[in-house]
Amino acid sequence: MTIAPDQPHAPGLDDCWNRIGVAGDLSCPKLEQHVHCRNCDVYEGAARHSMQRPVGPGYREDWAALLRQPQAARARHDSSGLVFRLGREWLLLPARMVSAVAPLAASHSLPHRSGGALTGIVNVGGTLTPSIALASLLGIDDNDATVQRVRHVFARLLVIVWEEQRFALPVADLHGILRYGAASVGAPAATLNRGLQRYITGVLTHGEMRIGVLDAPLIGHQLNRLLR
């Protein structure tokens, strides 16, 4: 577990990520190597320090009060997924499909396989992995994106596994893991483009975000078809 860059930190903790890291002025020399603070040993050590600090007054009482509530009164978060952005669309795939998140890297084209969603192969941690333009498959315009004014944005490679086959999906931004209740997934909006609508099973509302829940089996099937 790690602590988010904008969360309060424990007393005596140097929150360098808020000053010179991804939530600061980006002047930290380690960013060139680690790309994001969450990959840095300093950030990992700060998270460990934060988790090991003594609990505050009332911590046990607050949890006891929460656990005494009837089950129906509590939000039932029975599902989890990774939220990412393509163009201006926030989307979610089940967390169980996600193998890794890696820095964005250029793919190498394959002979006689140009012009489609399969853009080539990319080296991810020493393993050659098919690179798929998921935006192209879903009919999303990669260049149609809302300007991010309050946070730094980093494109990434999302590595997923379906039926033991790895795929690398370039994504414009990551929000992170979201736990949610399956019962809270609403119907897809009628205004979605037809290409995307086919792959969406529902929509989640998380703060101001509207997140399309992707049909994992259908996505996995289509990705495997691209390799044939």
Image (cartoon, rainbow, N blue to C red):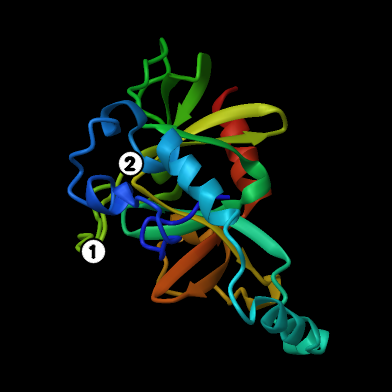
Q: In the image shown, does 60 or 34 lie closer to the viewer?
A: 60
Which amino acid type corresponds to the residue marked 1 in the rendered image?
A: Val
Q: Residues within 10 Å of mark 1 (few under 14, many from 20)?
A: few
Res. 155 mark: 2
**Of residues 111 and 36, which is closer to you in this image?**
36
Q: Nearer the viewer, mark 2 or mark 1?
A: 1
In the picture, residue 53 is in which quadrant? Answer: bottom right
Q: SS of the residue at dot 2?
A: loop
Q: Nearer the viewer, residue 17 or 206?
A: 17
C-alpha span from label 2 to label 1: 16 Å
For disc 2, the neighbor class at 10 Å (few under 14, some 14 to 19, many from 20) is some
Specify whether 42 is left or right of 27.
right
Q: Quadrant of residue 99?
A: top right
Residue 95 vertical placement versus 65 (above, below): above
Look at 59% across and 45% down and name the residue there.
Answer: 219
Badge 1 is on which residue? Answer: 150
Q: Where, quadrant-wise, is the C terminus in this rendering? A: top right
Q: Amino acid at mark 2?
A: Ala
Tell me the tag on residue 25: none
177 over 78 or under it: above or below:
above
How many circles with numbers are drawn on the protein?
A: 2
Q: Quadrant of residue 20?
A: top left
- Residue 38: give x, y in percent of width and height: 43, 42
In the image as oriented, which residue stretches furthest toward the top? 111
Q: Is residue 163 visible?
A: yes
* Residue nearer the viewer, 147 or 57: 57
Expressed as whole percent of the image width and height from the top left, the position of residue 58 reads 64, 82
Q: Position of residue 156 (x, y in %)?
A: 38, 38
